[in-house]
Image (cartoon, rainbow, N blue to C red):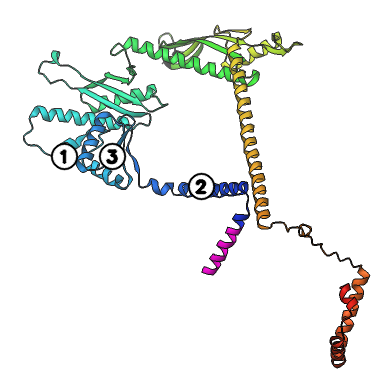
Amino acid sequence: MPEFFKQLIVQLTAIWRRLSLQQKIVTTSLIAFMILGMAGLLIWSSTGSRQESGFKVLYSDLELEEAASITENLQKGGYKYKLENNGRTITVDIKQLYEIRMALAREGLPRKHGLGYELFDKANFGMTDYVQKLNARRALEGEIQRTIEGLEEVKSARVHIVIPEPTIFLDKQKDAKASVVVKCAAGRELNKDQIRGITHLISSSVDGLKPQNISVIDYGGKLLSNPFGDDEEALTGSRNMELQQNVERYMENKANQILTNILGPSKAYVKIACDLDFDRVEKSMEKYDPESRVVRSEERIEESKKNAPDGDNQKERSLTNYEIDKSVQHLVQEVGNIKRLTISVAVDGRYETDKDQKSVFVARSAEELQNIEDLVKNALGYDLTRGDQITVSNVQFDNEFLRQEQQEMRSREKWEFYMTIAKYSLVFIIAILFLIFLRYLARTIADAMNPPVPALEKFGIEEPVEQESPVDIQRSSEILERVEMLTREEPVNIAAIIRQWLSEPVNPKQRKKR
């Protein structure tokens, strides 16, 4: 084996010496490129294993108070950590990650969800009545906070409850109050039903707390709960306005959907004013039909006399009571019935290209507008007896901004398309150049390993030219076959002939000819 390596080194050294300076530079560059590529692959493949020995996120998006408490405990425990994202993200050694989390959990960190009834896990006999009440309120706030943060839309929440001291004077007794600050998750928001649910949750959790005494705001300072408080009339008006807006929005979406499917997007716009009846009416009606009579009761009395002075007689008397037909109706009309609809429909025309390649507005015909009007009427339940009105107008929409956006989008798409083509073309060109380079390098190495044989003319030696015809070659082959056959059959005679040849003197003319 050592001899093999010695020969290999000798051969490589000989090949290296035969290369020119340019060939040596190219070969060295290729070998260096291959070594760097292999090293890069090894580094990339071992990145995952090396990352395991680095730092990993312990907790992220922390409040500064929580981050301060956690770092204080990490310092006490002697753990290494790093702060990122302006102190809101803490990273630790990945080998100690779960150990640190369990150690912090024993200390109740992080306190993201507030403290609940675990405040009373440790009994403190020296606690005053005031501190006991304060802890009870803190525990209640923490439990309500945890419940609110359980909603998917809520990222964090803070709850503040004010419970007044009870008094024997009822006229001086104050109501309990509460306020909630809610931070929603990114891209999420609370709807009104969820806000009402939060207010009723808190009012049901605190004795003597009414829903109207609860304020819910977001981190931007916007009031989310009912702003009217005890004003029932304002609250009723707000609910009625909300109901009217929901009905109008529903009917507008319904009409816009059918027009979008027919005319295309941004070709029509529908606006509806809906007049709702918010009066709750109860009616009791009694209707009599004098022409329809029903026998209610009938009484008949018969009297007969015999042997009377005036002779025998018989009397009959009847009494009939009739009931007149009567119908009783009790009607209850709920709020929210539609009293009247006012519908406005704006329809854009067509755009055609003229000879100068310019877009020209073309108004829609009266028949098309009538068809659109009929479709909208049927979709919205148009009722003429109710006093509904509808107006369909053909107007030219100002879509200049939309056209600019479309042009910018097209130009951006073209640019991205051209950049993609340029990128793939560049990759293709680089691949072709690399293949050409490899071909040139392979040819260079092959030429270096197989140098050309020097011509004999430089040394004054003529190359032998042997030209034999196929006939001569065939004849020589036949003679050799015969000689071989005779050698096998008559070896003695052949040996005598060879001795005779060796003993014969050489002719000087033949030597000179040779």
| Quadrant in which residue 331 is drawn | top left
Q: Amino acid at mark 1?
A: Asp
Q: Position of residue 470 (x, y in %)?
A: 91, 68
Q: Nearer the viewer, residue 208 or 69?
A: 69
Q: Is residue 325 visible?
A: no
Residue under circle 2? Answer: 36
Q: Three-letter amino acid code at disc 3?
A: Tyr
**Marks 3 and 2, how far apart in space?**
35 Å
Q: Does 41 sit left or right of 366 as displayed?
A: left
Q: Start and end of the magenta stretch? A: 1-14
Callout 3 secondary element = strand
Identity of the residue furthest to the bottom in this view:
492
| Res. 90 image quadrant | top left
Q: In this rendered view, identify the residue nearer to me: 254 or 432.
A: 432
Q: The residue tagged with tag 1: helix, strand or loop?
A: loop
Q: Spot the residue most to the left.
A: 126
The residue to which callout 3 is attached is 81
Q: Is residue 455 left or right of residue 414?
A: right
10 Å crowding of disc 2: few (<14), some (14-19), many (20+) = few
Between discs 1 and 2, the one toward the N terminus? 2
Q: Earlier in the sequence, mark 3 or mark 1?
A: 3
Mark 1 = which residue? 121
Q: Residue at x 39, y 45 (%)?
A: 51
Query: Looking at this rendering, what residue extends furthest in the front direction?
Result: 508
Q: Position of residue 450 (x, y in %)?
A: 68, 58
Magenta stretch secondary structure, dominant: helix
Residue 11 seen in the current view: yes
